[in-house]
Image (cartoon, grey):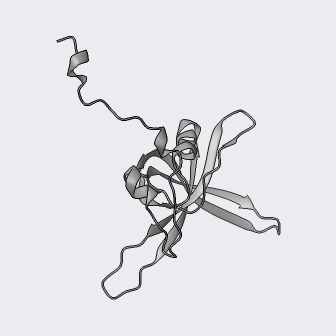
């Protein structure tokens, strides 16, 4: 059987890092994903719930903020629970196995939402430039 989800979308809120009683890092958030549509049709957006664990959760909360474009590879997971009114419910979410940056630091700093709200990608300045002249350090 095969359960693979690949999504790109924008975070709808800042992800928050939490810790389980056993000390495992976790974050839950949602992303806005545009649906494909035909010319002349109105575009639609789906809001997909995502959960990430351990180092993936720590990475997301450190480098992604509301409005950041994110690429996610994971699997769909269902959970059954009873709500406060005694109704049986099923929650669907994507468990993120791998995440990646989808836009450049410059693009994410200038990103705006559909209503014109500006987003900044705070934390992206933590990266250092790579020295392209690495041949000097090679032993051959």
Res 129 quadrant in image: top left
- Which quarter of the rendering shows the C terminus? top left
The answer to whether residue 102 is seen in the rendering is no
- The picture places residue 99, in percent across and down from the top left corner, at 45, 46
Image vertical order of residue 131 relative to residue 7, above or below? above
- The picture places residue 65, in percent across and down from the top left corner, at 55, 54
Image vertical order of residue 92 relative to residue 63, above or below? below
Given residues 121 and 81, the one toward you in this image is 121
Res 40 quadrant in image: bottom left
- The picture places residue 115, in percent across and down from the top left corner, at 52, 76
Given residues 105 and 38, the one toward you in this image is 105
Residue at figure coordinates x 30%, y 29% from the top left = 131
Given residues 15 and 27, the one toward you in this image is 15
Left or right: residue 103 compared with residue 113: left
Residue at figure coordinates x 50%, y 48% from the top left = 96
Residue located farthest toward the left when viewing the structure as drawn: 140
Q: How many marks?
A: 0
Residue at figure coordinates x 52%, y 50% from the top left = 64
Left or right: residue 129 compared with residue 112: left
Residue located farthest toward the bottom when viewing the structure as drawn: 40
Left or right: residue 78 compared with residue 68: right
The answer to whether residue 61 is seen in the rendering is yes
- The picture places residue 33, in percent across and down from the top left corner, at 46, 66
Residue at figure coordinates x 43%, y 70% from the top left = 34
Residue located farthest toward the top when viewing the structure as drawn: 139
Residue located farthest toward the right when viewing the structure as drawn: 85
């Amino acid at each position: 059987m095969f359960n693979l989800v690949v999504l790109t979308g924008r975070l709808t809120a800042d992800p928050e890092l939490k810790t389980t009683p056993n000390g495992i890092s976790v974050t839950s958030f949602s992303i806005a994903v545009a649906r494909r549509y035909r010319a002349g049709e109105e575009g639609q957006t789906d809001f997909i719930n995502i959960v990430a664990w351990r180092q993936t959760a720590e990475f997301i909360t450190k480098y992604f903020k509301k409005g950041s474009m994110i690429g996610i590879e994971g699997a769909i997971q269902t959970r059954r629970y009873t709500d406060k009114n005694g109704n049986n419910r099923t929650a669907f979410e994507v468990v993120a196995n791998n995440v990646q940056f989808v836009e450049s630091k410059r693009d994410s700093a200038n990103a705006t939402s559909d209503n014109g709200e500006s987003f900044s990608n705070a934390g992206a300045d933590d990266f250092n430039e790579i020295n392209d002249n690495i041949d000097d350090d090679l032993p051959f």
